[in-house]
Protein backbone atom coordinates (compact mmCIF):
# COMPACT_ATOMS: atom_id res chain seq x y z
CA UNK A 1 0.00 0.00 0.00
CA UNK A 2 2.91 2.33 0.70
CA UNK A 3 4.22 1.68 -2.80
CA UNK A 4 0.82 2.10 -4.41
CA UNK A 5 0.31 5.51 -2.77
CA UNK A 6 3.85 6.68 -3.54
CA UNK A 7 4.87 6.87 0.12
CA UNK A 8 7.61 4.27 -0.41
CA UNK A 9 9.76 5.31 -3.38
CA UNK A 10 13.22 4.09 -2.38
CA UNK A 11 15.00 1.94 0.20
CA UNK A 12 15.18 3.53 3.64
CA UNK A 13 15.74 2.56 7.27
CA UNK A 14 12.46 4.30 8.00
CA UNK A 15 10.36 1.56 6.40
CA UNK A 16 6.58 1.91 6.05
CA UNK A 17 6.15 -0.57 8.92
CA UNK A 18 8.40 1.40 11.26
CA UNK A 19 6.87 4.72 10.23
CA UNK A 20 3.36 3.41 10.79
CA UNK A 21 4.32 1.97 14.18
CA UNK A 22 5.79 5.34 15.14
CA UNK A 23 2.55 7.10 14.25
CA UNK A 24 0.45 4.46 15.99
CA UNK A 25 2.47 4.89 19.17
CA UNK A 26 2.26 8.69 18.96
CA UNK A 27 -1.53 8.54 18.58
CA UNK A 28 -1.80 6.37 21.71
CA UNK A 29 -0.17 8.99 23.93
CA UNK A 30 -2.26 11.24 26.16
CA UNK A 31 -0.32 14.32 25.09
CA UNK A 32 0.80 15.69 21.74
CA UNK A 33 4.21 14.45 20.62
CA UNK A 34 6.77 16.82 19.10
CA UNK A 35 9.12 16.00 16.23
CA UNK A 36 11.98 16.03 18.72
CA UNK A 37 10.24 13.38 20.80
CA UNK A 38 9.49 11.24 17.73
CA UNK A 39 13.08 11.23 16.46
CA UNK A 40 14.28 10.35 19.97
CA UNK A 41 11.82 7.47 20.05
CA UNK A 42 13.03 6.26 16.63
CA UNK A 43 16.61 6.28 17.87
CA UNK A 44 15.88 4.53 21.16
CA UNK A 45 13.39 1.96 19.83
CA UNK A 46 14.76 1.17 16.37
CA UNK A 47 18.27 2.60 16.37
CA UNK A 48 17.36 4.97 13.52
CA UNK A 49 19.08 8.35 13.71
CA UNK A 50 17.14 11.09 11.97
CA UNK A 51 17.00 14.89 12.04
CA UNK A 52 13.72 16.60 12.92
CA UNK A 53 13.64 18.32 9.54
CA UNK A 54 14.08 15.01 7.71
CA UNK A 55 11.21 13.42 9.62
CA UNK A 56 9.04 16.48 9.04
CA UNK A 57 9.68 16.18 5.30
CA UNK A 58 8.24 12.66 5.35
CA UNK A 59 4.87 14.20 6.12
CA UNK A 60 3.56 15.11 2.69
CA UNK A 61 0.54 14.45 0.47
CA UNK A 62 1.80 10.93 -0.26
CA UNK A 63 1.90 10.21 3.47
CA UNK A 64 -1.68 11.38 3.87
CA UNK A 65 -2.73 9.14 0.99
CA UNK A 66 -0.89 6.22 2.60
CA UNK A 67 -2.60 6.40 6.01
CA UNK A 68 -5.93 7.24 4.37
CA UNK A 69 -5.69 4.10 2.25
CA UNK A 70 -4.90 2.05 5.36
CA UNK A 71 -8.04 3.42 7.03
CA UNK A 72 -10.17 2.69 3.95
CA UNK A 73 -8.82 -0.86 3.73
CA UNK A 74 -9.44 -1.39 7.44
CA UNK A 75 -13.05 -0.25 7.15
CA UNK A 76 -13.71 -2.38 4.06
CA UNK A 77 -12.31 -5.49 5.74
CA UNK A 78 -14.00 -4.80 9.08
CA UNK A 79 -15.74 -8.07 9.80
CA UNK A 80 -19.40 -7.87 10.67
CA UNK A 81 -20.92 -9.81 13.56
CA UNK A 82 -24.12 -9.57 15.57
CA UNK A 83 -23.49 -7.45 18.65
CA UNK A 84 -26.33 -8.40 20.95
CA UNK A 85 -28.42 -11.27 19.53
CA UNK A 86 -29.73 -12.56 16.22
CA UNK A 87 -33.23 -11.24 16.95
CA UNK A 88 -32.15 -7.65 17.62
CA UNK A 89 -33.94 -5.50 14.99
CA UNK A 90 -33.84 -8.52 12.66
CA UNK A 91 -36.50 -6.99 10.40
CA UNK A 92 -33.85 -4.70 8.89
CA UNK A 93 -30.69 -5.35 6.88
CA UNK A 94 -28.66 -2.54 8.47
CA UNK A 95 -29.74 0.01 11.06
CA UNK A 96 -27.74 2.99 9.84
CA UNK A 97 -27.02 5.66 12.45
CA UNK A 98 -25.09 8.68 11.28
CA UNK A 99 -23.93 11.99 12.71
CA UNK A 100 -21.04 14.39 12.41
CA UNK A 101 -18.72 16.13 14.82
CA UNK A 102 -17.06 19.45 14.10
CA UNK A 103 -14.11 21.07 15.80
CA UNK A 104 -11.76 23.97 15.23
CA UNK A 105 -8.27 23.35 13.87
CA UNK A 106 -5.19 25.62 13.77
CA UNK A 107 -5.68 28.69 11.58
CA UNK A 108 -2.85 27.69 9.24
CA UNK A 109 -5.22 25.03 7.83
CA UNK A 110 -8.00 27.45 6.88
CA UNK A 111 -7.19 27.44 3.15
CA UNK A 112 -7.84 23.68 3.10
CA UNK A 113 -10.40 23.20 5.87
CA UNK A 114 -12.71 26.16 6.20
CA UNK A 115 -14.59 26.75 9.43
CA UNK A 116 -17.97 28.35 9.94
CA UNK A 117 -16.66 31.70 11.16
CA UNK A 118 -15.57 34.73 9.19
CA UNK A 119 -12.26 36.52 9.06
CA UNK A 120 -10.60 36.74 12.47
CA UNK A 121 -12.98 34.18 14.02
CA UNK A 122 -11.57 31.40 16.17
CA UNK A 123 -13.50 29.00 13.98
CA UNK A 124 -12.21 30.21 10.61
CA UNK A 125 -10.57 26.78 10.21
CA UNK A 126 -12.52 23.66 11.06
CA UNK A 127 -12.96 19.98 10.31
CA UNK A 128 -16.04 17.81 10.16
CA UNK A 129 -15.99 14.03 10.60
CA UNK A 130 -18.95 12.10 9.24
CA UNK A 131 -19.41 8.79 11.07
CA UNK A 132 -22.01 6.16 10.21
CA UNK A 133 -22.28 2.69 11.76
CA UNK A 134 -24.63 -0.27 11.78
CA UNK A 135 -26.32 -0.59 15.16
CA UNK A 136 -26.81 -4.33 14.66
CA UNK A 137 -23.15 -5.21 14.05
CA UNK A 138 -21.09 -2.15 14.98
CA UNK A 139 -19.64 -2.16 11.45
CA UNK A 140 -18.33 1.17 10.12
CA UNK A 141 -20.37 2.31 7.13
CA UNK A 142 -18.79 5.74 6.66
CA UNK A 143 -15.89 7.64 8.21
CA UNK A 144 -15.03 10.75 6.23
CA UNK A 145 -13.05 13.92 7.00
CA UNK A 146 -14.24 17.12 5.31
CA UNK A 147 -14.08 20.84 5.94
CA UNK A 148 -16.53 22.14 8.54
CA UNK A 149 -18.54 24.14 6.00
CA UNK A 150 -19.89 20.97 4.39
CA UNK A 151 -23.19 20.53 6.24
CA UNK A 152 -25.08 17.37 7.12
CA UNK A 153 -27.89 17.90 4.62
CA UNK A 154 -25.36 18.09 1.80
CA UNK A 155 -23.82 14.86 3.05
CA UNK A 156 -27.25 13.18 3.10
CA UNK A 157 -27.86 14.11 -0.53
CA UNK A 158 -24.40 13.01 -1.69
CA UNK A 159 -24.50 9.64 0.11
CA UNK A 160 -28.14 8.67 -0.52
CA UNK A 161 -27.04 6.01 -3.03
CA UNK A 162 -25.19 4.15 -0.25
CA UNK A 163 -28.50 3.09 1.31
CA UNK A 164 -29.77 -0.36 0.29
CA UNK A 165 -33.04 -2.27 0.38
CA UNK A 166 -34.34 -3.05 3.90
CA UNK A 167 -31.86 -0.65 5.53
CA UNK A 168 -33.23 1.57 8.30
CA UNK A 169 -31.81 5.11 8.36
CA UNK A 170 -31.89 7.01 11.68
CA UNK A 171 -30.49 10.56 11.67
CA UNK A 172 -31.09 13.91 13.34
CA UNK A 173 -32.75 16.99 11.88
CA UNK A 174 -29.54 18.27 10.29
CA UNK A 175 -29.76 15.52 7.65
CA UNK A 176 -33.46 15.98 6.92
CA UNK A 177 -34.17 16.27 3.20
CA UNK A 178 -37.40 15.53 1.32
CA UNK A 179 -35.53 14.39 -1.85
CA UNK A 180 -33.45 12.00 0.28
CA UNK A 181 -36.60 10.52 1.87
CA UNK A 182 -37.92 9.96 -1.66
CA UNK A 183 -34.74 8.08 -2.61
CA UNK A 184 -34.77 5.96 0.55
CA UNK A 185 -38.40 5.02 -0.05
CA UNK A 186 -37.77 4.24 -3.73
CA UNK A 187 -34.93 1.87 -2.79
CA UNK A 188 -37.23 -0.16 -0.56
CA UNK A 189 -35.42 1.11 2.54
CA UNK A 190 -36.78 2.77 5.67
CA UNK A 191 -36.26 6.00 7.61
CA UNK A 192 -36.99 7.35 11.07
CA UNK A 193 -36.54 11.05 11.69
CA UNK A 194 -37.79 13.86 13.82
CA UNK A 195 -40.01 16.30 11.94
CA UNK A 196 -38.56 19.81 11.40
CA UNK A 197 -40.86 22.60 12.60
CA UNK A 198 -40.97 24.34 9.20
CA UNK A 199 -42.32 21.27 7.38
CA UNK A 200 -46.07 21.45 6.80
CA UNK A 201 -48.22 18.40 7.55
CA UNK A 202 -51.45 17.45 5.75
CA UNK A 203 -54.09 14.86 6.56
CA UNK A 204 -55.29 12.25 4.07
CA UNK A 205 -57.75 14.77 2.61
CA UNK A 206 -54.98 17.30 1.93
CA UNK A 207 -55.98 19.64 4.78
CA UNK A 208 -53.12 21.11 6.83
CA UNK A 209 -53.05 19.77 10.39
CA UNK A 210 -53.63 22.40 13.08
CA UNK A 211 -51.32 21.44 15.95
CA UNK A 212 -53.06 23.86 18.33
CA UNK A 213 -56.32 21.95 17.91
CA UNK A 214 -54.44 18.65 18.13
CA UNK A 215 -52.84 19.69 21.43
CA UNK A 216 -56.21 20.73 22.89
CA UNK A 217 -57.81 17.46 21.76
CA UNK A 218 -55.06 15.22 23.17
CA UNK A 219 -54.85 16.99 26.54
CA UNK A 220 -58.63 17.11 26.92
CA UNK A 221 -58.92 13.37 26.29
CA UNK A 222 -55.80 12.34 28.20
CA UNK A 223 -54.03 11.00 25.12
CA UNK A 224 -50.24 10.93 25.46
CA UNK A 225 -49.32 9.13 22.21
CA UNK A 226 -51.00 8.73 18.85
CA UNK A 227 -50.20 8.24 15.20
CA UNK A 228 -51.77 8.89 11.82
CA UNK A 229 -51.05 8.59 8.13
CA UNK A 230 -50.18 12.03 6.74
CA UNK A 231 -48.44 13.83 3.91
CA UNK A 232 -45.51 16.16 4.56
CA UNK A 233 -44.22 19.18 2.63
CA UNK A 234 -45.59 20.53 -0.63
CA UNK A 235 -44.37 17.33 -2.31
CA UNK A 236 -47.00 15.43 -0.28
CA UNK A 237 -44.70 12.64 0.86
CA UNK A 238 -46.77 9.88 2.55
CA UNK A 239 -45.46 8.97 6.04
CA UNK A 240 -46.58 7.73 9.43
CA UNK A 241 -46.58 10.63 11.87
CA UNK A 242 -45.94 9.44 15.43
CA UNK A 243 -47.05 12.02 17.99
CA UNK A 244 -46.10 12.20 21.66
CA UNK A 245 -46.92 14.90 24.21
CA UNK A 246 -44.05 16.10 26.39
CA UNK A 247 -44.41 17.00 30.10
CA UNK A 248 -45.10 20.65 30.85
CA UNK A 249 -41.65 21.19 32.41
CA UNK A 250 -40.03 19.96 29.19
CA UNK A 251 -42.27 22.28 27.18
CA UNK A 252 -41.29 25.27 29.34
CA UNK A 253 -37.59 24.50 28.85
CA UNK A 254 -38.06 24.20 25.09
CA UNK A 255 -40.02 27.44 24.93
CA UNK A 256 -37.38 29.29 26.96
CA UNK A 257 -34.55 28.13 24.67
CA UNK A 258 -36.57 28.85 21.52
CA UNK A 259 -37.49 32.38 22.58
CA UNK A 260 -33.94 33.08 23.71
CA UNK A 261 -32.60 31.96 20.34
CA UNK A 262 -35.24 33.97 18.47
CA UNK A 263 -34.40 37.06 20.52
CA UNK A 264 -30.73 36.81 19.56
CA UNK A 265 -31.75 36.72 15.91
CA UNK A 266 -34.15 39.64 16.33
CA UNK A 267 -37.19 37.49 15.59
CA UNK A 268 -40.50 36.55 17.21
CA UNK A 269 -41.44 32.96 17.96
CA UNK A 270 -44.47 32.00 15.85
CA UNK A 271 -47.60 30.63 17.53
CA UNK A 272 -47.41 27.47 15.40
CA UNK A 273 -43.86 26.87 16.62
CA UNK A 274 -44.93 27.32 20.24
CA UNK A 275 -47.58 24.62 19.92
CA UNK A 276 -45.20 22.29 18.11
CA UNK A 277 -42.95 22.43 21.17
CA UNK A 278 -45.62 20.47 23.06
CA UNK A 279 -44.87 17.43 20.91
CA UNK A 280 -42.27 14.88 19.99
CA UNK A 281 -42.96 14.38 16.29
CA UNK A 282 -41.44 11.56 14.28
CA UNK A 283 -41.93 10.55 10.67
CA UNK A 284 -41.26 7.08 9.32
CA UNK A 285 -42.23 4.72 6.53
CA UNK A 286 -41.89 1.62 8.75
CA UNK A 287 -45.19 -0.19 9.20
CA UNK A 288 -46.84 -0.05 12.62
CA UNK A 289 -46.73 -3.85 13.00
CA UNK A 290 -42.90 -3.67 12.81
CA UNK A 291 -42.47 -0.39 14.70
CA UNK A 292 -45.41 0.30 17.02
CA UNK A 293 -46.09 3.83 18.16
CA UNK A 294 -44.81 3.25 21.71
CA UNK A 295 -41.47 1.86 20.45
CA UNK A 296 -40.63 4.80 18.16
CA UNK A 297 -39.02 7.05 20.75
CA UNK A 298 -36.89 4.24 22.31
CA UNK A 299 -35.64 3.30 18.83
CA UNK A 300 -34.75 6.90 17.98
CA UNK A 301 -32.84 7.19 21.27
CA UNK A 302 -30.23 4.80 19.88
CA UNK A 303 -29.10 7.74 17.74
CA UNK A 304 -27.60 9.32 20.84
CA UNK A 305 -24.96 6.59 20.88
CA UNK A 306 -23.07 8.25 18.03
CA UNK A 307 -22.91 11.55 19.93
CA UNK A 308 -21.62 9.73 23.01
CA UNK A 309 -19.07 8.04 20.77
CA UNK A 310 -17.79 11.42 19.55
CA UNK A 311 -17.48 12.53 23.17
CA UNK A 312 -15.43 9.41 23.93
CA UNK A 313 -13.20 9.95 20.89
CA UNK A 314 -12.39 13.48 22.00
CA UNK A 315 -11.89 12.74 25.68
CA UNK A 316 -9.85 9.55 25.16
CA UNK A 317 -7.92 10.34 21.97
CA UNK A 318 -7.83 14.18 22.12
CA UNK A 319 -8.73 14.42 18.44
CA UNK A 320 -9.83 18.04 18.73
CA UNK A 321 -6.73 19.32 20.55
CA UNK A 322 -3.90 18.40 18.18
CA UNK A 323 -1.12 20.99 18.32
CA UNK A 324 -0.39 23.38 15.48
CA UNK A 325 1.64 21.75 12.73
CA UNK A 326 1.79 21.75 8.96
CA UNK A 327 -1.27 20.47 7.13
CA UNK A 328 0.01 17.09 5.94
CA UNK A 329 1.36 16.14 9.36
CA UNK A 330 -1.83 17.30 11.08
CA UNK A 331 -4.14 15.28 8.78
CA UNK A 332 -1.83 12.26 9.00
CA UNK A 333 -2.02 12.30 12.80
CA UNK A 334 -5.79 12.70 12.64
CA UNK A 335 -6.16 9.70 10.32
CA UNK A 336 -3.89 7.63 12.57
CA UNK A 337 -6.16 8.36 15.53
CA UNK A 338 -9.16 7.21 13.48
CA UNK A 339 -7.29 4.00 12.60
CA UNK A 340 -6.58 3.40 16.28
CA UNK A 341 -10.26 4.01 17.07
CA UNK A 342 -11.45 1.57 14.36
CA UNK A 343 -9.09 -1.16 15.60
CA UNK A 344 -10.18 -0.66 19.21
CA UNK A 345 -13.89 -0.60 18.39
CA UNK A 346 -13.55 -3.80 16.39
CA UNK A 347 -12.02 -5.51 19.43
CA UNK A 348 -14.77 -4.15 21.71
CA UNK A 349 -17.53 -5.24 19.31
CA UNK A 350 -16.08 -8.72 19.03
CA UNK A 351 -15.99 -9.06 22.84
CA UNK A 352 -19.60 -7.82 22.99
CA UNK A 353 -20.63 -10.39 20.38
CA UNK A 354 -18.92 -13.23 22.27
CA UNK A 355 -20.67 -12.23 25.50
CA UNK A 356 -24.03 -12.31 23.71
CA UNK A 357 -23.31 -15.76 22.24
CA UNK A 358 -22.54 -16.99 25.77
CA UNK A 359 -26.04 -15.96 26.82
CA UNK A 360 -25.05 -12.77 28.64
CA UNK A 361 -27.53 -10.58 26.75
CA UNK A 362 -27.72 -7.91 29.42
CA UNK A 363 -23.94 -7.63 29.65
CA UNK A 364 -23.52 -4.42 27.63
CA UNK A 365 -19.98 -3.03 27.47
CA UNK A 366 -19.23 0.61 28.17
CA UNK A 367 -17.44 2.04 25.14
CA UNK A 368 -15.91 4.79 27.27
CA UNK A 369 -14.35 2.40 29.78
CA UNK A 370 -13.24 -0.09 27.12
CA UNK A 371 -11.71 2.56 24.85
CA UNK A 372 -9.69 4.01 27.72
CA UNK A 373 -8.34 0.58 28.66
CA UNK A 374 -7.47 -0.31 25.07
CA UNK A 375 -5.79 3.05 24.51
CA UNK A 376 -3.54 2.34 27.49
CA UNK A 377 -2.74 -1.04 25.87
CA UNK A 378 -1.95 0.36 22.41
CA UNK A 379 1.56 -1.12 22.21
CA UNK A 380 0.21 -4.55 23.09
CA UNK A 381 -2.48 -4.22 20.43
CA UNK A 382 0.15 -3.18 17.91
CA UNK A 383 2.14 -6.31 18.74
CA UNK A 384 -0.98 -8.40 18.15
CA UNK A 385 -1.32 -6.84 14.68
CA UNK A 386 2.34 -7.61 13.97
CA UNK A 387 2.44 -11.21 15.15
CA UNK A 388 0.25 -14.30 14.83
CA UNK A 389 -0.32 -17.68 16.38
CA UNK A 390 -0.29 -18.48 20.09
CA UNK A 391 1.20 -15.16 21.22
CA UNK A 392 -1.56 -13.12 19.57
CA UNK A 393 -4.26 -15.50 20.84
CA UNK A 394 -2.92 -15.24 24.38
CA UNK A 395 -2.84 -11.41 24.26
CA UNK A 396 -6.38 -11.23 22.83
CA UNK A 397 -7.60 -13.64 25.50
CA UNK A 398 -6.16 -11.37 28.19
CA UNK A 399 -7.90 -8.34 26.66
CA UNK A 400 -11.17 -10.29 26.50
CA UNK A 401 -10.85 -11.19 30.18
CA UNK A 402 -10.15 -7.60 31.22
CA UNK A 403 -13.03 -6.09 29.20
CA UNK A 404 -15.55 -8.74 30.23
CA UNK A 405 -14.70 -8.42 33.92
CA UNK A 406 -15.48 -4.83 34.91
CA UNK A 407 -16.25 -2.69 31.88
CA UNK A 408 -20.04 -2.77 32.01
CA UNK A 409 -22.41 0.01 31.08
CA UNK A 410 -24.00 1.11 34.35
CA UNK A 411 -27.74 1.31 34.85
CA UNK A 412 -28.86 4.73 36.00
CA UNK A 413 -32.08 5.53 37.77
CA UNK A 414 -34.49 7.99 36.13
CA UNK A 415 -32.35 8.12 32.99
CA UNK A 416 -32.40 6.35 29.66
CA UNK A 417 -31.46 2.73 30.14
CA UNK A 418 -29.54 1.45 27.13
CA UNK A 419 -29.70 -2.17 28.31
CA UNK A 420 -33.50 -2.07 28.56
CA UNK A 421 -33.70 -0.56 25.06
CA UNK A 422 -31.60 -3.40 23.65
CA UNK A 423 -33.88 -5.99 25.24
CA UNK A 424 -36.96 -4.09 24.08
CA UNK A 425 -36.01 -4.55 20.43
CA UNK A 426 -34.57 -8.06 20.58
CA UNK A 427 -37.74 -9.74 19.33
CA UNK A 428 -39.84 -6.83 18.11
CA UNK A 429 -39.95 -7.94 14.48
CA UNK A 430 -41.45 -11.28 15.52
CA UNK A 431 -44.20 -9.87 17.75
Image: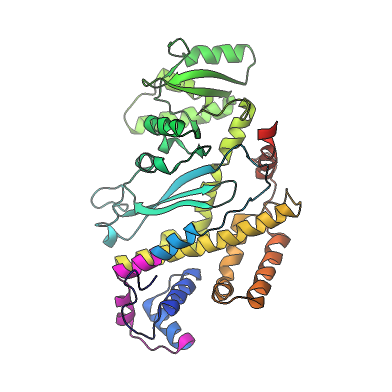
Q: Residue furthest right?
A: 359
Query: Residue 127, percent across and down?
Result: 36, 54
Q: Is residue 166 above or below residue 59?
A: above
Residue 65 part of the magenta-drawn span: yes
**Residue displayed at 46% across by 64% down:** 337
Residue 118 part of the magenta-drawn span: no
The region drawn magenta spans: 45-68
Query: Can residue 339 be spotted in the picture?
Result: yes
Query: Residue 128, percent across and down?
Result: 38, 51
**Residue displayed at 73% across by 48% down:** 361
Query: Can residue 322 be spotted in the picture?
Result: no
Query: Residue 109, percent across and down?
Result: 28, 60
Q: Main secondary structure of the magenta part?
A: helix
Q: Is residue 45 above or below residue 341?
A: below
Front-most of 201 and 191?
191
Front-most of 44 and 141?
141
Which corner quadrant holds the N terminus? Answer: bottom left
Which corner quadrant holds the C terminus? Answer: top right
Amino acid sequence: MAIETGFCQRSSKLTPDVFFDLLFYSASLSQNSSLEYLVSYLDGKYGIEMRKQSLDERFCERTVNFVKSVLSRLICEHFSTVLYCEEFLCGFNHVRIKDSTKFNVPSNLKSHYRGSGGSGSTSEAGISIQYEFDLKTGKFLDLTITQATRNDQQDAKETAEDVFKNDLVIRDLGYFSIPVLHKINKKGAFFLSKLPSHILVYDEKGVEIDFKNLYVFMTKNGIEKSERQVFISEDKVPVRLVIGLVPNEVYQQRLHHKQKDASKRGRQTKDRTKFLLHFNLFVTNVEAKILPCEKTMPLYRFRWQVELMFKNWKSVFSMHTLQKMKKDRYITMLYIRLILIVVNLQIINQVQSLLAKQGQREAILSYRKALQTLKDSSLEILSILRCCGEKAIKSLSEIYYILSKNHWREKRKKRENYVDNICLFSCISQK
